[in-house]
Image (cartoon, grey):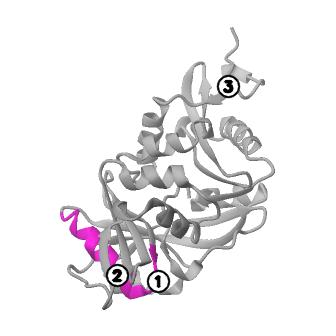
Amino acid sequence: MPNPFEITADRPGGFAVAAARAEDIVTLGAWAHEEGWNPGLHDGGVFFATDPGGFLFGRLDGEPVTAVSVVRYGSAYGFLGFYLTRPHLRGQGYGLRTWQAGTARLAGRTVGLDGVPAQQDNYRRSGFRTCWSNARYEGTPPPDIAPPPGTTLIDARSVPFDLLAAYDRRYFPAARDTFLAAWITAPGRTALAAVRDGELQGLGVLRACRAASRIGPLYAASPAVAASLVSALAATAPDTAVAIDVPDVNPAAVRLAGELGLTPSFDTARMYSGPEPAIDRPGLYGITSLELG
């Protein structure tokens, strides 16, 4: 009986691309770990809940061998990630077929991705343009960096959610309330907001990972606010280093990473097909995730 969730009809060698099952997200996390991407320990459930139909697996004779995530946000934006083929099958066209199935799901939308260097030329040939670079900075920041006078750090989950969602929208091309609510409340998370005179001045989320704990998003009204958030978040995970994917489109963020004693370890490029979205670049100190933007 045909699989009602299958996307590709062309099945050379028993290969087919279909929507992932919830259990496949565990496999996806393991593959990302093998690539050295250091995924969060509890990212999978958050990702899948955001758009369950946005995760595709290619199976060869029933075994998963390729993947791509193509998550829809609203009616006009999407984000592509987790583009993976098992190493022993690369160069045989299975990844391309998976890519084609994924991009078809995002047809007509502006699409963003964070591409590793080895894939960036392929993405350009598919119509993506590089808009900035991200460098992952890792290390142990100084402790006890106080926020600027008049600014306090509080648990972000105590902030009215509509305010948090509106604040996030300044730095992301589309509303993503479902994702944000799950992101700040998932296990292994610390979420802090910087507040001054009742106004949000910053937001940072730290999540436990297989290696360095990762901070993202990191939004701030100034380097001083960002530094205090990084210091306070790192203090909640004293047994590991922290890592932040810092966009070079915000030079203040790059300078701050160096001043905090963090060193670059991994590079990606933010690329878009379609019009480049307008966001508050000066306040973006760290992107949320390489997989869902």
Above/below status of 90 relative to 232:
above
Q: CA distance from mark 1 to mark 3?
A: 47 Å
Above/below status of 99 relative to 216:
above
- Which region of the structure is painted magenta? 219-238
Mark number for residue 227? 2
Q: Is residue 140 visible?
A: no
Image coords of residue 203 (percent x, y)? 41, 71
Badges 1 and 3: C-beta atoms under 8 Å apart? no
Is the C terminus in the top left, top right, bottom left or bottom right quadrant? Answer: bottom right
Mark number for residue 16? 3
Q: CA distance from mark 2 to mark 3?
A: 47 Å
Query: 231 or 141: nearer the eye?
Result: 231
Residue kind at label 1, given as amino acid type: Ala
Query: 135 or 200: nearer the eye?
Result: 200
Which residue position is annotated with label 1? Answer: 221
- The residue carrying pointer 3 sits among few (fewer than 14), some (14 to 19) or many (20 or more) residues within 10 Å by Cα, namely many
- Compare marks 2 and 3 and give the one earlier in the sequence: 3
- Compare marks 1 and 3 and give the one earlier in the sequence: 3
Image coords of residue 210 (percent x, y)? 31, 51
Image coords of residue 49 (percent x, y)? 51, 40
Is the N terminus in the top left, top right, bottom left or bottom right quadrant? Answer: top right
- Tell me the mark number nearer the camera, choosing from 1 and 2: 1
Query: 283 or 245: nearer the eye?
Result: 283
Residue kind at label 3, given as amino acid type: Ala
Q: Tell me which corner region of the image, top left, top right, bottom left or bottom right, holds residue 53.
A: top right
Badges 2 and 3: C-beta atoms under 8 Å apart? no
